[in-house]
Image (cartoon, grey):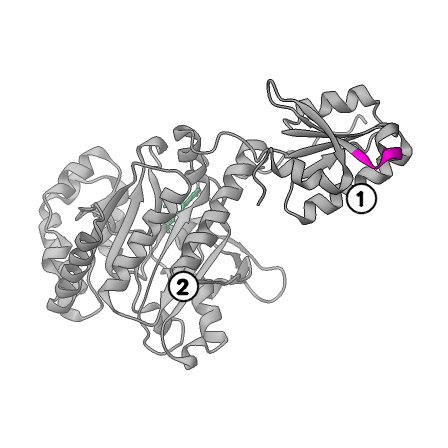
Amino acid sequence: MGKNLIRCIEGTRDYFDLDGARFGKAMKAADHVFTAYGYSQIHTPVFEATELFARGIGEATDIVEKEMYTFKPGSDMITLRPEGTAGVIRAFLQHSMHKQGGLNKLWYSGPMFRRERPQKGRQRQFHQVGVEAVGSSDPLLDAEVIAMGLQFYAAVGITGIRTRLNSIGCSAPECRAKYRETLREAIRPNLDKFCKNCQNRFDRNVLRLLDCKNPSCKELAANLPKSHEHVCGECADHFGKVTEALDAFGVDYVIDPTLVRGLDYYTKTVFEYTHSALGAQDAIGGGGRYDGLVEELGGPSIPAVGFAIGVERVMIAMETLGACCCTAPLMVYGIAAGDEEHKAMSGLLARLRRAGVSCDMDFEGKSFKAQMRTAGRRGALIALILGSNELETGQITVKDMREDGGQSTVPLSQMQEAIEALVTVG
Ligand code: AMP
């Protein structure tokens, strides 16, 4: 005692109690929903060669310019991953997954790291669940991915998601490059009216002037030429098919010409999910098509589409909407009168756990009365009581802990049945 307490680093957090339950619910929903769409899990390292992100995300992006945690512990520069896609595509190529041909549907979850200014919904270590569908340019797949994201939010109990959609074109000279020029021409006469940040980005990354959060820049951006109206014929056709499929799926969306996303690798479709519960950081997930990334990372030309969802923001929305307001209840708390009963109880609980009943018991040598109090405090639905009489006669008392709940003493062989009559197991 007497030593300084060590706290977690600014911009990082611990998750327990209800936050632990919310986090767990998000992971379960991701597994359930993404598996239903034919995705399998991939887990890649938390740190990668810095070059992977510089090349994959783009040098002129906020992330690569100022938000990465980069180290040189030995001779190589390494970076804590700021997002998941680059690592997944690196793994996809390293393990020659493309050689099997066809479409690869992969999903991941895990921590990401960005050195941003921490605020509500913005951390330096945060978590994402994400999907990458690699190997198809079918616009129906873009729509399926967008609809799947919405199904994930529904599965964690989040309603009121808004889906913003745009097309930012492709690398063909007559497409995004031409649109960039059109945009520069439209902005140039008024460039001095944009904020300093926008002025700096005008030459390097003019698309980002469209999504500047500054109110006066926003006003100016509203009247600029719209990318989905200036993309090449192929991209316009693709976008039309995506919106058609979304309409057919019954997905609500708004076309937002100011949506460009912060990462360079996107082509054609981009989308973002927002939620009003989140305040200033209202993006709860986002993604798009990235047909050039596999090639950029040294592979063949393979089209792909995906998204990443911010788990912390999902947890904030769940909290606001009361979507997960309790931890999973403990079904059974075992109460034992003495040493022999204590040992016997541990065997009984092991049996119940194998049958899917969640159970716990005392390990602190508490008195019978104190064990009863703990059962109540832990919110157990059932107290399983083993006194010396019961142990001798091969019986057990099953007490329903809910208000007006009764109790009955049954032979040990009927214990599980008696429990299943009171709670739903499995
Ligand atoms: P991005 O690909 O950068 O749009 O990130 C995808 C999602 O991750 C966003 O929509 C957010 O929900 C979440 N996210 C991004 N950065 C952070 C952060 N610093 N803290 C918490 N969540 C974040």
User: On the image, which quarter does residue 254 sit in?
Assistant: top left
Q: What stretch is highlighted in magenta?
A: 391-395
Q: Name the residue under label 1.
A: 347
Which residue lies at the image location 66% right of the left edge and 36% below the top edge?
418
Mark 2: C-beta under 8 Å from nearest atom of ligand 1: no
Neighbor class of circle 2 (other Cα within 10 Å; few <14, some 14-19, many 20+) is: few
Which residue lies at the image location 47% right of the left edge and 54% below the top edge?
31
Q: Residue furthest bottom?
A: 99
Which residue lies at the image location 73% right of the left edge and 20% below the top edge?
373
Which residue lies at the image location 79% right of the left edge and 25% below the top edge?
2
In the displayed structure, 416 sits above or below 130; it is: above
Q: Which amino acid does label 2 sit on?
A: Gly
From the image, give the main secondary structure of the stretch colored magenta: helix
Q: Mark 2 points at which residue?
A: 38
Q: How far apart are marks 2 and 1 (CA)?
A: 40 Å
Q: In which quarter of the image is the C terminus?
A: top right
In the displayed structure, 114 sits above or below 19; it is: below
Neighbor class of circle 1 (other Cα within 10 Å; few <14, some 14-19, many 20+) is: few
